[in-house]
Amino acid sequence: VKDVEMEDAADIASGEEKPTDAAAAAAADESMVEADAAAEEEKTEMVDPTESLNKEHLDALTSSMGFTLIRAQKGLLNGNGGTVEGAVEWLMQHQDDADIDEPIPFVPKAGGGGGAGGGVAQSYKCNECGKILSNMANLELHANKTGHSDFEESTKAVKPLTAEEKANKVEEIKALLKAKRTEREEAEKAQSIESEKARRFMGQEMAKTREQMEREALKRDALMRKKEKEAARRERERLRAEIAKDKLERQANKGKLKTTLGADGYNPSAVQYDVADLAEGVVAPKKAFKADPKKIDEYIKKVSSYRAGGDGQKCLKILLAYVGNVVDKPEEEKFRSINTENKAFKTKVKPFLGAKALLVAVGFKQNEAGDALVLKEDADRDTLKETKAKLEAAYAAY
């Protein structure tokens, strides 16, 4: 109001007439255009913000404390008050930023000349805590850290440190950095110790697990050997009983043996001699081998009774192959003949009581050469099919 009254008085004293509203508006527009042009011209002028930094502060940060030049400059530009301690505090908080080592961009040149009023603003003041902040970056950092929002410009400049204060501050900062470094090293050492403990614990647990698995494997192997020995013992006892029975039968029948015993190295059913013929030196001819189809179940049961080493199961498997091939492919001539001289028949069929009898019962007969079993033309196919089913069941139940 006071300014308006002074302008009115000046106008009256000079005797000039006030401009019309249109003229005033035109003058205002022209002034705004000139002001915008001047602001644009001033805005385009860019300067290096690091030129105004304190050289002593830069030297203290780079030479005494080991910071790089770019970090020292950023610390002084963004730190509190442009001081060494403010720069170090800012660098400690931003040393891990991704752009910490990027070049410092130029900034618009500040407008010159202060107003006619008080002094030039040299800092910012927080009205909530009274802290003096040297630049806008420190103001924003302080606001983010404290949540304060009431600030104003201040003409108070941050007082630079004396040489002695600077030296003390440098020592204090060095001690702080050393303490933080020591704390970090101790934390890393403790973490390393914990990792080593965890690694050793896992190694011990793995060793225990491996030892336990090895012990269980040894137990299983021992149990398996024990079972095999027991099965072999029972088989030997069975064979001894069969041999004793054979001897008794020979004694009761004057040296003749009506039954057969299938065992490797002992097969008395091959040739039977008559006592009278032996006395005269004449060998009796070999009798024809006969088998009853009604006793097929009995023959299968006898073969299944061989438990040692799974011999009975192997014999059942071969018998099933012989009979199954004839049933499934009756037109194949090769399946109608069984070579009794090959290794499979001699070791896995012939030694076992009931195996050859089963083949004869289903329709096989010895050929004239005596080296093969040949399926008869009138062999009963129903009997073959039933025998195949019985062999499959016995093999599965073994």
Image (cartoon, helix red, strand yellow):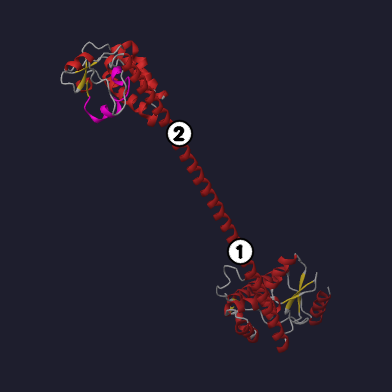
Q: Residue 368 at what x, y percent from top left?
A: 16, 18
What's drawn in magenta, residue-wise? Answer: 340-358
Of the pair 179 and 213, the residue shown nearer to us: 213
Can residue 284 be seen? Answer: no
Q: Residue 167 at what x, y percent from top left?
A: 69, 86
* Mark 2: amino acid: Lys
* Mark 1: amino acid: Ile
Q: Residue 200 at what x, y percent from top left?
A: 57, 58
Of the pair 169 and 160, the residue shown nearer to us: 169
Please, is residue 5 above or below residue 60 in the view?
above
Q: Earlier in the sequence, mark 1 or mark 2?
A: 1
> Which image quadrant is residue 39 in?
bottom right
Please, is residue 34 above or below residue 226 in the view?
below
Left or right: 376 as drawn, with respect to 228: left
Residue beneath the point at 31% across and 26% down: 263
Residue 297 colored in magenta in the image: no
Determine crowd level at label 1: few under 14, some 14-19, many 20+ residues with C-alpha closer than 10 A.
Answer: few
Question: Which quadrant does the N terminus fall into?
Answer: bottom right
Q: Residue 7 at what x, y percent from top left?
A: 79, 77
> Which image quadrant is residue 153 in?
bottom right
Instruction: Identify the residue under disc 2.
Output: 227
Q: Disc 1 vs disc 2: Cβ atoms closer than 8 Å?
A: no
Left or right: 396 as drawn, with respect to 321: right
Can residue 133 be seen? Answer: yes
Instruction: Identify the residue under disc 1.
Output: 193
Determine crowd level at label 2: few under 14, some 14-19, many 20+ residues with C-alpha closer than 10 A.
Answer: few
